[in-house]
Image (tube, rainbow, N blue to C red):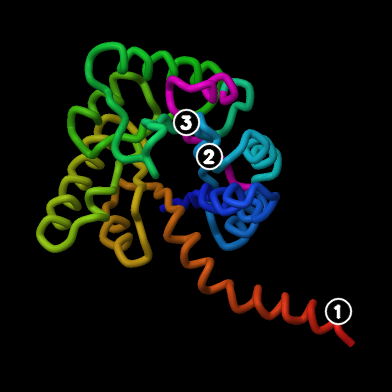
Amino acid sequence: MRLYVNVDHIATVRQARGTDEPDPVRAAVLCELGGADGITVHLREDRRHIQDRDVRILLETSRTGVNLELAAASDVLALAEEWRPMQVTLVPEKRQEITTEGGIALGAGEARREVGAALERLRNAGSRTSLFIDPDADAVRATADLGADAVELHTGEYANTRGTERARQLARLAHAAALARQAGLGVHAGHGLTYENVTPLAAIAEIEEVNIGHSIVSRAVLVGIERATREMAEILRRARP
């Protein structure tokens, strides 16, 4: 199973102070050294965390591959055509949300036509395509009909429940993953996955890739803080004879 690490939250910390650190590009290098199979970034319309500069440099420096998340109806689509990342995942996007709240809408009508047009543009640019969807049979079938290469199953409901309801959501994910594989789609998963809840999901044979960001960045704050403090203290000691 491939692990793609989402470094959006590194950029969130940087943007909170409007400075140049921490740098998500540097974080991506460390993720790759730590065993990540790829890097995921979501370039939002409002540029609340990842910036155009981040994506450009990542595409030039990543030794694994970059999965660029974007909304189908955003200005970022034209940038993706220009940049030609290895993979593009189309996701829903609302300005007021804290994080992505669910799968992309694929019902009949303008929304579906919009997604289909975006997929065609990305295919013509040479990028592998994926749709972030709820783990439902209709969404899987719609993804296959639209010609995407893969689905990313939204795992938020699984991650946010416990007990029998979590077991039900896990079974729902397993069923959707099996349908996707039968349809010839690559099967990815992500949203809300942590060190504590990822193991049962990883046991689903059809899932070949997971995208995890917040939990990894959160743990990095704790397990890396000792070294960061020690290095800063050493700098101060050297500065004061």
The answer to whether mark 2 and mark 1 are in CB contact below 8 A is: no
Q: Quadrant of the C terminus?
A: bottom right
Marks 3 and 2 sit apart, C-alpha to C-alpha, by 13 Å
Dot 1 lies on which element? Answer: helix
What residue do we see at 64% from left, 55% from top? Answer: 22
Q: Quadrant of residue 137?
A: top left
- Compared to residue 176, the image places residue 239 above or below, namely below
| Closer to us: 130 or 241 | 241
Marks 2 and 1 sit apart, C-alpha to C-alpha, by 37 Å
What residue do we see at 70% from left, 50% from top? Answer: 20
Q: Is residue 20 visible?
A: yes
Dot 3 lies on which element? Answer: strand
Measuring from the top left, give residue 107's x and y in whole percent: 23, 20
User: Which amino acid lies under the numbered mark 1 shown in the image of this protein?
Assistant: Ala
What residue do we see at 33% from left, 19% from top? Answer: 146
Q: Which residue is mark 3?
A: 70
Residue found at the very far right of the displayed protein: 241
Measuring from the top left, give residue 171's x and y in whole percent: 16, 50
- Compared to residue 199, the image places residue 61 above or below, namely above
- Stretch of the chain drawn in magenta: 63-80
Which tag is nearer the camera, tag 1 or tag 3? 1
Measuring from the top left, give residue 147's x and y in whole percent: 36, 21
- Compared to residue 45, the image places residue 99 above or below, namely below
Q: Which residue is mark 2?
A: 48
User: Which amino acid lies under the numbered mark 3 shown in the image of this protein?
Assistant: Leu
Marks 1 and 3 sit apart, C-alpha to C-alpha, by 46 Å
Q: Is residue 38 visible?
A: no
Q: Label 3: how many residues lie within 10 Å, few (<14), some (14-19) or many (20+)?
A: many
Dot 2 lies on which element? Answer: loop
Q: Which residue is mark 1?
A: 239
The answer to whether mark 1 and mark 3 are in CB contact below 8 A is: no
Q: Quadrant of residue 110?
A: top left
